[in-house]
Image (cartoon, grey):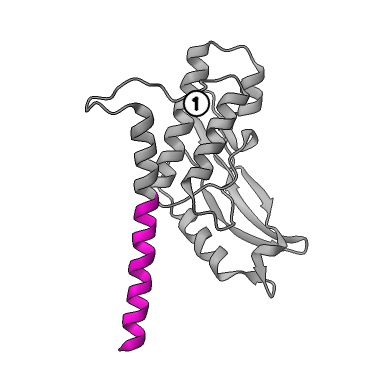
Amino acid sequence: MRHDSVVRKRLDDDCLLDGELHPSIAERLARVLELPVSSVANLHGVERDEHGVWLVWQFIDGITLDEFASQSHSQAERDSIVRELRLAVAAMHSHGIVHGAIHARNVIIDSRGRVCLTHISPLLYSDPADDIREVERLAARMGFMSRISPRAGTNGNTVAQRYRRRAFLAAAAALIAGVMMFAAILWYIRV
């Protein structure tokens, strides 16, 4: 695995305000920079050159989900990849980040069969259900598990129910944090 390589992705001009990062975009990217999830490529920073503004991402050595799906794999291997993808998305959501650009080119499978998400959208996506829908579309389109396994968990909940609950809790935590920040700003203004 190459640790020294990066991938640069040009930032759309609509993410800029008077040539600088829009404050909301800058705040989102700062949160992505600090994301402590090993199944998501690290954002190293933002660079500017004469050709534009670039997001600098960790290079993940592996193959895209498209490439994986085009190869011959057992159903168990395919199902394992979908489970890993769902866990990666849930982990990201648990930290209040919605990917916003989940598609087969942004899902990398390394040589050990681990899934890593790349290129989180800088745009202000906030609904975890959008990511979950995209994961399910990918799974269905590529002939992977068409549904989350109906196996019951130890407390009687199905895996699907636990997954939806995790995504809901991540969204609720992000909402509560936003409300608390808003309340703090209001308190500060009154003082």
The magenta-colored residue range is 171-191
Numbered marks: total: 1
Q: Main secondary structure of the magenta part?
A: helix
In the image, what residue occupies the spot 66% across and 49% down?
A: 8
Q: Is residue 51 left or right of residue 179?
A: right
Residue 175: percent from left, percent from top: 38, 59
Q: Where, by quadrant of the figure, is residue 65 drawn?
A: top right
Res 64 seen here: no
Mark 1: which secondary structure?
helix
Res 92 seen here: yes
In the image, what residue occupies the spot 60% across and 45% down?
A: 101
Q: In the rendered structure, which amino acid carries the disc numbered 1?
A: Val
Residue 182: percent from left, percent from top: 38, 72
Relative height, residue 95 to residue 88 (above, below): below
Q: Which residue is mark 1?
A: 82
Relative height, residue 18 to residue 68 (above, below): below
In the image, what residue occupies the spot 60% across and 69% down?
A: 22
Q: Is residue 176 left or right of residue 30?
A: left
Residue 9: percent from left, percent from top: 67, 50
Q: Please rate how many residues cluster around mark 1, counting C-alpha atoms within 10 Å: few if below 14, some from 14 to 19, many from 20.
A: many
Q: Residue lying furthest left in this view?
A: 155
Dividing the image into 4 quarters, which one contains the C terminus? bottom left
Relative height, residue 111 to residue 54 (above, below): above
